[in-house]
Amino acid sequence: MLFVATLESLPGKYEAAVRKFKRPVVPESVKIDHFLGLFGKPDCIVVFEAPDEKSAADFTMQFADVAEVTTSLALDINDFKWTH
């Protein structure tokens, strides 16, 4: 499964957040496709693969003490069925 997480550092935690973003703990079951710093908000975006939602949550929650984390399941646009 493909996931996208946005990370926005908490007030007063920017330096700690960047240190953590640069050295994430990546479980064997997770594969990071892209970990990008952004010029603007949010501060980072992570595109990664995980076998299930629990694994994705376990991975992204390591950032919760330094950042607001929002994680979404990503689907190929061609899998969207509401239009042709």
Image: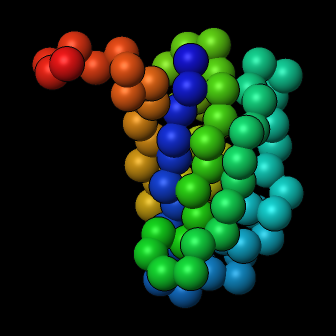
Q: What residue is drawn where x is 65% and y is 35%?
A: 48
Q: Residue at x 36, y 15 (%)?
A: 79
| Viewer-side residue, 35 vs 24 | 35
* Colouring chosen for the image of the structure: rainbow
User: In the picture provided, is 19 more to the left or to the right than 12?
Assistant: right
Outermost residue on the left side: it is 82
Quadrant housing residue 76: top left
- Toward the front, the furthest residue is 84
Which residue is at the front of the view, 72 or 67? 72
**Above or below, 25 relative to 40:** above
Whether 73 is drawn above or below 34: the answer is above
- Dividing the picture into quadrants, the one containing residue 63 is bottom right
Give how far across and how far down residue 66 sits, in percent.
58, 66
Which residue is depicted at the point 44% across and 75% down?
Answer: 41
Compared with 23, 1 (above or below) is above
Where's residue 56, x and y in %?
58, 28
Where residue 16 sits: x, y (%)?
71, 75
Q: Quadrant of the N terminus?
A: top right
Res. 29 in view: yes
Decide if residue 65 is on the left or right side of residue 16.
Answer: left
Residue at 56% over, 26% down: 2
Residue 8 image position (x, y, % from top left): 49, 68
Image quarter where the C terminus lies is: top left
Seen from the viewer's position, the closer of residues 74 and 54 is 74
Is residue 10 among the parts visible in the rendering?
no
Q: Where is 63 relative to 43, above or below?
A: above
Residue in front for this viewpoint, 47 or 30 = 47
Give the number of marks: 0
Q: Is residue 84 left or right of residue 47?
A: left
